[in-house]
Amino acid sequence: MTQIGDLFAQVRARFAKLDILVNNAATNPFFGEVLTADERAWDKTCSVNLKGYFFLSQYAARMMKEQGGGAIVNVASVNGIKPAPFQGIYSITKAGVIAMTKSFAKELAGFNIRVNALLPGITDTKFSAVMVQNAEFMQAVLPMIPMGRISDPSEIAQLVLFLASDAASFITGQAIVIDGGGFVAGADQL
C-alpha cells in the first residue's frame, strides 16, 4: 500500500490532478484444474488482478472526487463472464474486476467519476503469447471467432481511449466485450 500512496503523492505533486486511470495488469501463474491450485497461485493472482485494481481505483477516485470528476477504465477479460478451462483463478479474478467496476461506478457516479471495464478476448500481447504461438490452440480457437482473427493491442487501446474520453460522458458501470464476436458466437466451447 505504501507504493500506491507514494505513486499518488507523486502524481499530485507533479500534475495536481488526475483525469484518467487505466487499470491494465494481469497475471495467471497457474494453468490447471481448480482442484490442484495452491494458495500461492491464488494469492499472487488475486493480489495483481484484484487488490491492485481496487486500491489504485480508490486512490484515483479520491483525487478525482476533489477535482470534480474523472474516468477509470478497468481491463478485465471475457473470462470474467465465460471462464475458460484450466484458468479458474484468473477467471474468478476477472469476474471480480467486473463486479468491482459496477460497484465503483454506482458509488462514484454522483461525483462525476465514470468507471467502466472492457473485456478483451485473445489479444496478441506478451501475456497471451503462449496461446498465440501455439498453432494447435489457434487452429481450435480461430473458427470460434466470427472475425476469424485475434485482436491487436491497438484495437483494445481505441476502446480504452473512447471510454476515457468525453465521448463516453454518459457511460458508466459497463463491461464491454471486445473479442471479434467470439462471445456472441459461443466461444465457450473452449
Image (tube, rainbow, N blue to C red):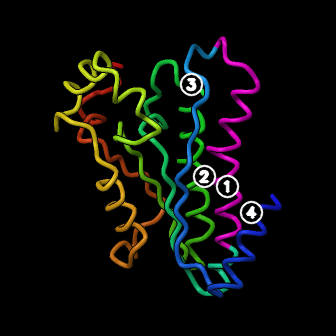
The span from disc 4 to disc 3 (Cα, nearest Å) is 28 Å
Q: Residues within 10 Å of mark 2 (few under 14, many from 20)?
A: many
Q: Residues within 10 Å of mark 4 (few under 14, many from 20)?
A: some
Q: Secondary structure at mark 2?
A: helix
Residue at mark 2: 100
Indicate left or right for 128 with 28 as reference. left
What residue sits 74% from the left and 63% below the top? 4
Picture coordinates of residue 43, whole percent (x, y)? 74, 34
Picture coordinates of residue 52, whole percent (x, y)? 68, 52
Please state which amino acid type lies under the numbered disc 4: Ile
Closer to the chain start, of discs 4 and 2, is 4
Picture coordinates of residue 83, whole percent (x, y)? 47, 28
The span from disc 4 to disc 1 (Cα, nearest Å) is 11 Å
Question: Do the numbered discs 4 and 3 sit on residues whose CB atoms are within 8 Å?
Answer: no
Given the current orientation, which residue lies at the most extreme right position?
Answer: 2
Please state which amino acid type lies under the numbered disc 2: Met
Closer to the chain start, of discs 3 and 1, is 1
Q: Is residue 33 above or below residue 188?
A: above
Residue at mark 4: 4
Please state which amino acid type lies under the numbered disc 3: Gly
Query: Which range is magenta?
Result: 35-61
Q: Is residue 190 above or below residue 153?
A: above
The span from disc 2 to disc 1 (Cα, nearest Å) is 7 Å
Closer to the chain start, of discs 4 and 1, is 4
Residue at mark 3: 88
Residue at mark 1: 54
Indicate left or right for 41 with 157 as reference. right
